[in-house]
Image (cartoon, rainbow, N blue to C red):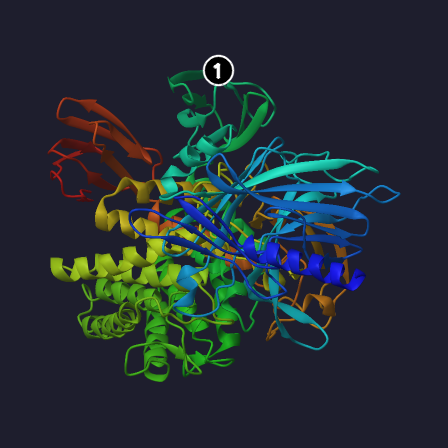
């Protein structure tokens, strides 16, 4: 009888579990596996269903309750516990999960209770969400969701994941969540037993409890559960639609204040503006000394407020909003002049050694040195940088044949060197530098370009590994300019242009099936470098049909890249940063993976947005470009002028970093390969949401932290000498890098800095433009360079 009763109970439980696998309304449906994990969420909409995939493997499915104690993760299995409810236990900590319809959206109620006899103070405890973030193959990665923004505030949490098709899934909780984290995959052993990290994301975690320290904006009390104490959260999934609707959509589900600034970076004495979503908010803006600034606050409706504030001087400004007991923060910045930024970057090329290694990233600072020399000559510094480049070049190349001596198949080293030689030539005027660049261009295209146009490395397409084709186009343009004095350069220029065009045509034909260095994934640089190179080629087209062909291809790729970019984060230090996460191990000898954003490679998207603006005239691309430049400028400490390597986004990183130099090498010795951080003395520490310092001032062997200089190269191309004026649909005329005085149909445009010599106009009607003492009439409805 007992056995029959037990069997009946077991059968009932199984039937209950099986019968609970659908939670749905007319707008959405959640499929729940018999194990209690989500299999998928389907949002129904007129344009078609939007399906959010979840992992279905035992290791990564979720939501699953997990703890991290003594550096070990434990994951529990759910037991059915009523209608749409499950419970489990780890080490005396009970977790109950209930799926529900909360405010019209699919949600989870989670309760943690300490049933043990002692305090519970883990490193972490929370949920592995189980959303499929693992981007490993084409075209499947277009349906995977990247964890683009997670935002912990002291009183609540929100964020979003997005896929390359720009479908956006919001996540929100009106209760505070301690932190968040990502499980990054392992890559490869080299040398055994040491592992380098991989290029993919295994899981996104909401860490309901997390040990301190955490960033000051996070809740500071969620580091423990006392005996018999319970804490409860409701976490909702929100179908956002277009990313521009993020704050509006989330505010319909959660009564929390949200801050959005279209522009996050400014010049001294600019007026900043931003929007606050929230009922009857109290808003303060303070400078980095804590002094409040006078603000203009205007409510546009019951839950929307526009704030304006004058930002008087260089620095970071903190916005704090309190509404109905909830609080939120944002950071705006006022950056130094581009001149100051480039000059400080040039000084950094001397402090942080440019090293002759197997990776161009370790001598990337020469870009900054030569661009600064071109516009702001300093004989002593420029001679030192130029002479040392020649020494380094001769160590890495056969100086008679002008070919690489080491790892010739790592063709991005050669294309990068071509770019540096061009900048050196334009700064110093030595024709020998252009000749070397031209010889390297011929060597590259003759040895590492396939018949279909792709530049390659051992069978892998490398066109979009540090933009090989862009460097060839830069070479072609320099040669074309040289042909004005020496006609023989014209044929050489055309040869290199055709090589680059053929490579870019291969990218266009790939339709997103790109390849890159390392582990295949929907990779930040692979996508942004493809977009920027296609965009650069589009700008060189005189035939409108060809120009549109390349523009359309470029925009499709750039839009897909949005999921990898911080487009909505209310923090000027991070805005427009791209979400790279495997560079720290190579660049600054630090483990494990962590989001480095902005990182030097964030500049690749900034080139693309700059080209997108020139091609389309859509102001959003120009705004994104200037926001990026502000974030890049802050990689130089605005107080000390010292260079930092990158900004780490993760709020809590248990880091291990090499802290000793390689005693077998000097800074001027050739070193090859990627040395593993654990081959050296290391130090462990915890940090998060902060800048990471350079290491090339003390680490002798190949480190790649000088890749940060890509942001200054981009700055030199896009904004150092260029100003822009835009007429908005409401008739307002605004300037970027300049001030505009309007007098009827006459505009006087005053550049913000002396070296700004070019003016781009984007006006609805013709105006007479005064610029540097000259006058011209701007074309109507035709974005173009006027001066």
Residue drawn at (50%, 37%) of the image = 571
Is the N terminus in the top left, top right, bottom left or bottom right quadrant?
bottom right
Q: Please say if 464 is above or below 716.
A: below
Mark count: 1
User: Where does the image place residue 547, in percent across and percent down from the top left?
Assistant: 17, 59
> Would you identify the image quadrant in which residue 266 lies?
top left
The residue at 20%/42% (across/down) is 787
Q: Position of residue 84 (x, y in %)?
A: 59, 47
Q: Residue at x 81, y 48 (%)?
A: 92
Q: Position of residue 784 (x, y in %)?
A: 18, 45
At x 22%, y 65%, the residue is: 480
Spot the residue most to the right.
117
In the displayed structure, does residue 572 sit left or right of residue 306?
Answer: right
Tell me where residue 496 sits by quadrant: bottom left
Name the residue carrying label 1: 294
Left or right: 733 in relation to 545 = right
Quarter-of-image position of residue 733: top left
């Amino acid at each position: 009888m007992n056995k029959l009763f037990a069997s009946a109970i077991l059968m009932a439980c199984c039937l209950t579990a099986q019968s609970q696998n659908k939670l749905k309304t007319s707008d959405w449906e959640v499929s729940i596996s018999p194990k209690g994990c989500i299999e998928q969420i389907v949002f129904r909409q007129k344009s078609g269903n939007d399906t959010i995939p979840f992992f279905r493997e035992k290791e990564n499915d979720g939501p699953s309750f997990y703890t991290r104690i003594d550096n070990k993760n434990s994951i529990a299995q759910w037991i059915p516990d009523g209608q749409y409810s499950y419970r489990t236990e780890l080490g005396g900590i009970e977790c109950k999960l209930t799926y529900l319809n909360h405010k019209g959206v699919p949600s989870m109620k989670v309760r943690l209770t300490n049933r043990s006899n002692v305090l519970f103070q883990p490193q972490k405890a929370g949920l592995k969400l189980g959303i499929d973030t693992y981007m490993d193959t084409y075209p499947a990665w277009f349906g995977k969701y990247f964890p683009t923004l997670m935002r912990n505030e002291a009183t609540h949490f929100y964020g979003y994941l997005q896929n390359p098709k720009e479908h956006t899934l919001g996540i929100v909780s009106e209760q505070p969540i301690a932190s968040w984290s990502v499980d990054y995959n392992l890559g490869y052993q080299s040398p055994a037993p040491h592992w380098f990290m991989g290029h993919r994301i295994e899981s996104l975690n909401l860490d309901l409890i997390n040990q301190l320290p955490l960033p000051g904006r996070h809740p500071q009390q969620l580091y423990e559960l006392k005996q018999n104490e319970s804490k409860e959260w409701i976490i909702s999934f929100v179908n956002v639609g277009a990313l521009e609707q993020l704050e509006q959509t989330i505010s319909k589900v959660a009564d929390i204040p949200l801050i959005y600034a279209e522009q996050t970076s400014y010049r001294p004495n600019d007026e900043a503006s931003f929007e606050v979503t929230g009922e009857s908010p109290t808003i303060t803006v303070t400078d980095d000394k804590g002094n409040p600034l006078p603000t203009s606050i205007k409510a546009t409706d019951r839950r929307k407020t526009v704030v304006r504030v004058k930002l008087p001087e260089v620095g970071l400004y903190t916005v704090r909003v309190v509404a109905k007991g909830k609080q939120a923060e944002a950071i705006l910045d006022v950056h130094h002049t581009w001149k100051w930024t480039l000059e400080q970057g040039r000084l950094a090329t001397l402090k942080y050694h440019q090293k002759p290694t197997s990776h161009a990233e370790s001598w990337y600072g020469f870009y900054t040195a030569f661009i600064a020399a071109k516009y702001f000559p300093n004989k002593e510094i420029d001679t030192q940088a130029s002479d040392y480049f020649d020494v380094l070049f001769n160590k890495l190349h056969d100086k008679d044949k002008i070919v690489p001596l080491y790892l010739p198949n790592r063709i991005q080293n050669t294309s990068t060197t071509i770019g540096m030689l061009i900048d050196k030539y334009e700064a110093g005027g030595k024709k020998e530098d252009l000749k070397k660049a031209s010889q390297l261009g011929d060597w590259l295209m003759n040895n590492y370009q396939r018949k279909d146009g792709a530049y390659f490395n051992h069978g892998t397409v490398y066109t979009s590994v540090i933009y090989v084709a862009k460097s060839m186009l830069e070479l072609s343009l320099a040669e074309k300019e040289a042909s004005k004095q020496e006609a023989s350069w014209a044929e050489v220029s055309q040869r290199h242009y055709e090589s680059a065009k053929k490579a870019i045509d291969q990218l266009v034909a790939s339709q997103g099936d790109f390849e890159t260095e390392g582990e295949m994934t929907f990779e930040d640089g692979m996508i942004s470098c493809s977009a920027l190179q296609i965009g650069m080629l589009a700008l060189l087209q005189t035939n409108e049909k060809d120009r549109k062909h390349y523009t359309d291809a470029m925009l499709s790729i750039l839009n897909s890249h949005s999921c990898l970019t911080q487009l909505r984060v209310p923090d000027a230090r991070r805005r427009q940063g791209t979400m790279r996460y495997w560079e720290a191990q190579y660049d600054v000898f630090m483990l494990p993976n962590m989001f480095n954003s902005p990182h030097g490679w964030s500049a690749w998207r900034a080139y693309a947005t700059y080209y997108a603006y020139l091609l389309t005239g859509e102001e959003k691309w120009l705004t994104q470009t200037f926001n990026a430049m502000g974030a890049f400028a802050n990689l130089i400490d605005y107080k000390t002028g010292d260079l930092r390597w990158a900004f780490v986004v993760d709020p809590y990183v248990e880091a291990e970093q090499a802290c000793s130099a390689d005693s077998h090498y000097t800074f001027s010795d050739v070193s090859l390969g990627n040395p593993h951080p654990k081959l050296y003395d290391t130090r462990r520490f915890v940090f998060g949401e902060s800048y990471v310092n350079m290491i090339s001032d003390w680490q002798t062997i190949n480190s790649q932290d000088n890749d940060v200089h890509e942001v200054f190269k981009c700055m030199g191309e896009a904004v150092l000498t260029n100003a822009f004026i835009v007429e908005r649909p409401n008739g307002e005329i605004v300037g970027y890098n300049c001030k505009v005085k309007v007098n009827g149909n006459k505009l006087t445009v005053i550049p913000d800095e002396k070296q700004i010599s070019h003016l781009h106009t984007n006006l609805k009607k013709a105006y007479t433009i005064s610029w540097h003492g000259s006058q011209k009439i701007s074309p109507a409805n035709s974005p173009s360079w006027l001066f």
